[in-house]
Image: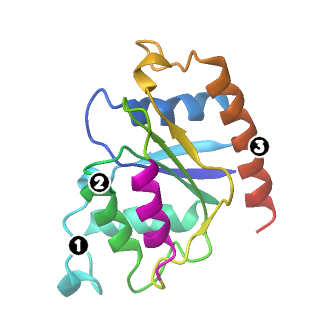
Amino acid sequence: MKLAALIGSVRKDSFNRKIADFIGERYQSDFTLEKLGIQELPYFDQDQETDPPESVRTFKQKVKDADAILIVTPEYNHSVPGILKNAIDWVSRIDLVMAGKPVLMIGASPGFLGTVRCQLHLKQILAAPGVSALVLPGNEVFIGEVHKKMDDTGKITDEGTVEFLDGVMKNFKTFIESK
């Protein structure tokens, strides 16, 4: 199964990027994961939506070709990072490549609550008519105090977190297969 990963952080040492890498490696027998370079997308411009730049066309094609979308994101100011919102804005127009696409949201933060507020907003965005993604219900992944749960290489070392992710990824695979 092909997963396209949208990572809501461009920080070089991003916890969320490390989690995406961990998922790609740990569940490689079930999924192939491609991290999409959303930082390369220009700001959404309605004047360009019918003839977007090549980076947007490539991005949209990769989303379309994926069996499902993995969103791994931090929380900025109690909401969705602008770079992630911009990527979603591009896929919400004209050919609607995320419509009906299974999505799993994961978020990590050094804070105690993880990315609870961000994911609440993200669910609303993903339910918008132009997006119409199918978010895996009942499998919220909020990794709080992430800096205490992984080593310097990005491997998640907290057994409870790994066990929880194992269950969620199994549920996600079943969810994708049912669509």
Q: Is residue 98 above or below residue 48?
A: above
Residue drawn 30% across the image and 26% down it:
13
Look at discs 3 and 1 and give the one toward the viewer: 3
Residue pointed to by mark 3: 170
- Which of these two is toward me, 8 or 64? 8
Identify the element where label 2 is drawn. loop
Query: With 98 as the anchor, is 117 left or right in this view?
Result: left
Magenta stretch: give its range: 116-128
Q: Is residue 45 magenta?
A: no
Which numbered circle lies on residue 81?
A: 2
Identify the element where label 3 is drawn. helix
Residue drawn 66% across the image and 35% down it:
165
Which numbered circle lies on residue 44?
A: 1
Q: Main secondary structure of the magenta part?
A: helix
Look at discs 1 and 2 and give the one toward the viewer: 2
| Residue 179 place in picture, x, y as percent | 76, 69
Q: Is residue 121 above or below residue 50?
A: above
The amino acid beneath tag 2 is Pro
Residue 30 visible in the snapshot: no
**Disc 1 to disc 2, C-alpha distance:** 14 Å
Question: Considering only order in the chain, which callout, 3 or 2, is on the residue closer to the N terminus?
Answer: 2
**Disc 2 to disc 3, C-alpha distance:** 27 Å
Crowdedness near tag 2: few (<14), some (14–19) or many (≥20) residues, C-alpha within 10 Å: some
